[in-house]
Amino acid sequence: MNVAERDAARASESGAEKPDIAAAPARAGKRRLRPLLALLPYVARYRMRAIAALIALLLAAVATLVVPIAVRRMIDLGFSRESVTLIDNYFAVMIAIVAVLALASAARFYLVTTLGERIVADLREDVFGHLVSLSPGYFDAAKTGELTSRLTADTTQIKAAVGASVSVALRNLVLFAGGAIMMVVTSPRLSAFVLAAIPVIVLPLYGFGRAVRRRSRAAQDTLADASAYASELIGAVRVLQAFTNEQLAKSRFGAAVERAFVAARDSIQARAILTAIAIFLVFASVVVVLWVGAQDVLAGHLSGGRLSQFVLYAVLAATGLGQLSEVWGEISQASGAAERLFEILNVQSAIVPSARPLPLPQPPRGEIAFADVSFAYPSRPEILVLDRLSFEIKRGEKVAIVGPSGAGKSTIFHLILRFYDPISGVIRFDGAPLIEVDPQALRARIA
């Protein structure tokens, strides 16, 4: 493609195929974690593995929630000689519970991690397959480095979330819910104090979680920009060195990397603040409840074993909620990465095959005809690269197309391959209008 055509083509699809990506930041605040829901069809492909992982997760959580009950019984029964056999039995049961917990945790780790690897492998394959199916005009405007970053860095971010963070989040959510229920069963009065503190804990987590997601997306975008810049420079290294612009390129890439670092630092800072606030609020509420429980024990309203059971459940619930806040940042980052990947999957090719494609005639003749064909790139509609061009090439003929740079020589071949559609006029191949022919069949015949 000559210079004039290339300049026009680089922006040719900005109005036709790029709106989904360009408009994405404006919609980011509304989507929150919605992009992760788009992964559900990938999970459904391996539903049995996902169900097995969920069962292992629930089994591990239940085993953890049983431990405080045994602790309460030991404390309330005391450590007298009469209760030695009973205590021995409790310790034996606890060993069995720990064994179940270990096996269930190992199964959960294996199943969830391999599920994450499988989902990301399928996602990478689908994104790449969709990319190569888009019309070439899309790549005139898109940056190769950015697309590569999405296929590598963003899918890795999703793998970390699906393979670990989501599992940890579900586990801690179950522990939090189970611990909260058992707290109410153990002492409704103390549970009321804890429940009153939940809104104070959850609202800051929600607010900071949104900030983390915005900053995570900014960090991913700046890193993709740096990767795209490096990819373009490396691809044109001969031109770069010919004009002795190595130092300029190094300084510009350094500036891009610095912007990526600042964005990543801001994202990490937001996650650190989120973690600090969550841990303080959660464990401060536990201390207050523990003080109230101690007063009830002194007043005789509560036994020491029951208070210990309540405290253990409170710690489990608080720990679950605290760790939930930590992985929330990672899940938010994965949501941003998923959003970027599904933006690519949602891009529609500018070249749409006919619903009922016309079959090319047999045997192949190799005849080409242009009838009053005009073409301009969508970004510069006022500049006609071809203006009412007509010609016919019959079977066996050899035709040379000559002209100065920018005359539209390469564009003619791109139109014959239906990389673009003309503004007006008709192009025929072997007598069939290209607009009615399946592009894959057309290109296969030419190939």
Image (tube, rainbow, N blue to C red):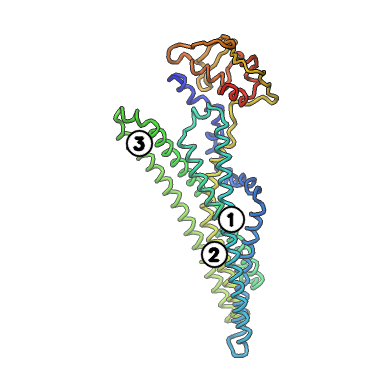
Q: Select label 2 or label 1 by which is in front.
A: 1
Q: Which mark is residue 252?
A: 3
Position of residue 212 measured from the top left corner of the image (x, y, whole percent): 50, 49
Check disc 1 and report its element: helix, strand or loop.
helix
Q: Residue at x 45, y 55 (%)?
A: 272
Q: Which residue type does callout 2 highlight?
A: Thr
Q: Which residue type does callout 3 highlight?
A: Arg
Residue 286 shows in this picture: yes
Q: Select label 3 or label 2 by which is in front.
A: 3
Q: Residue at x 55, y 65 (%)?
A: 318
Q: Which of the 4 image quarters holds residue 38?
A: top right
Q: Nearer the viewer, residue 407 or 305?
A: 407
Q: Which residue type does callout 1 highlight?
A: Val
Is the residue 23 above or below the residue 93 in the image?
above
Q: Are marks 2 and 1 in contact (CB under 8 Å)?
A: no
Q: Which of the 4 image quarters holds residue 23?
A: top right
